[in-house]
Image: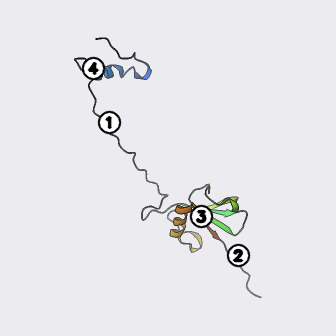
């Protein structure tokens, strides 16, 4: 029986004798099959950013509008890629860690819900009024 296997090349050279022995069945009629490869889904990497599960809070990025000085925003990414362009340019002013509360007693759950739905949450900083004279 002629050897139909290709010549050993490059990275296959060490494995070629093993491959030939697996493909040869002894009588030359049917190649021996290997056990089928089991596909394992990729392992899930823990990402502390999403809020899909209870107890996991996202990192929130804070921005300030250059167009309107009182306008602020929260976003889910450090670049603020989903912030509305008509109020930009936007400048990053800080980050709220998952274990910290947002400034001015703003509700974290509402902020995270808006970020999940729209990619951002806008809010206004009220200017301090001078007391009446």
Residue 117 x, y percent position in the rendering: 53, 62
Q: Tell me which residue sits at (39%, 47%) in the image.
A: 43
Q: Residues within 10 Å of mark 4 (few under 14, many from 20)?
A: some
Residue 123 x, y percent position in the rendering: 63, 69
Name the residue that disc number 2 marks: 127
Q: Residues within 10 Å of mark 1 (few under 14, many from 20)?
A: few
Rounded to the nearest angstrom, the CA distance separating label 1 from label 4 is: 20 Å
Name the residue that disc number 4 marks: 24
Q: Closer to the observer: label 1 or label 2?
A: 1
Relative to 125, say whether 2 is above or below.
above
Number of numbered discs overlaid on the protein picture = 4
Name the residue that disc number 1 marks: 37
Rounded to the nearest angstrom, the CA distance separating label 2 from label 4 is: 83 Å
Task: State the residue lying farthest toward the right.
Answer: 133
Is there CB contact under 8 Å for labels 2 and 3?
no
**Mark before the other along the chain sequence, 3 or 4:** 4
């Amino acid at each position: 029986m002629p050897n139909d296997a290709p010549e050993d090349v490059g990275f296959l050279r060490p494995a070629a004798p093993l491959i030939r022995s697996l493909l040869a069945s002894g009588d030359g009629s049917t190649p021996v099959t290997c056990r089928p490869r089991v596909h394992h889904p990729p392992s899930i990497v823990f990402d502390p950013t999403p809020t899909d599960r209870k107890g996991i809070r996202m990192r929130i990025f804070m921005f300030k509008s250059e167009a309107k000085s009182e306008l602020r925003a929260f976003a889910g990414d450090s670049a603020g890629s989903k912030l509305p362009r008509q109020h930009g340019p936007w400048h990053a002013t800080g980050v709220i860690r998952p274990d910290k509360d947002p400034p001015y007693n703003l509700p974290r759950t509402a902020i995270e819900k808006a970020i999940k739905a729209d990619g951002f949450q806008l809010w206004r900083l009220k200017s301090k009024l001078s007391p009446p004279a």
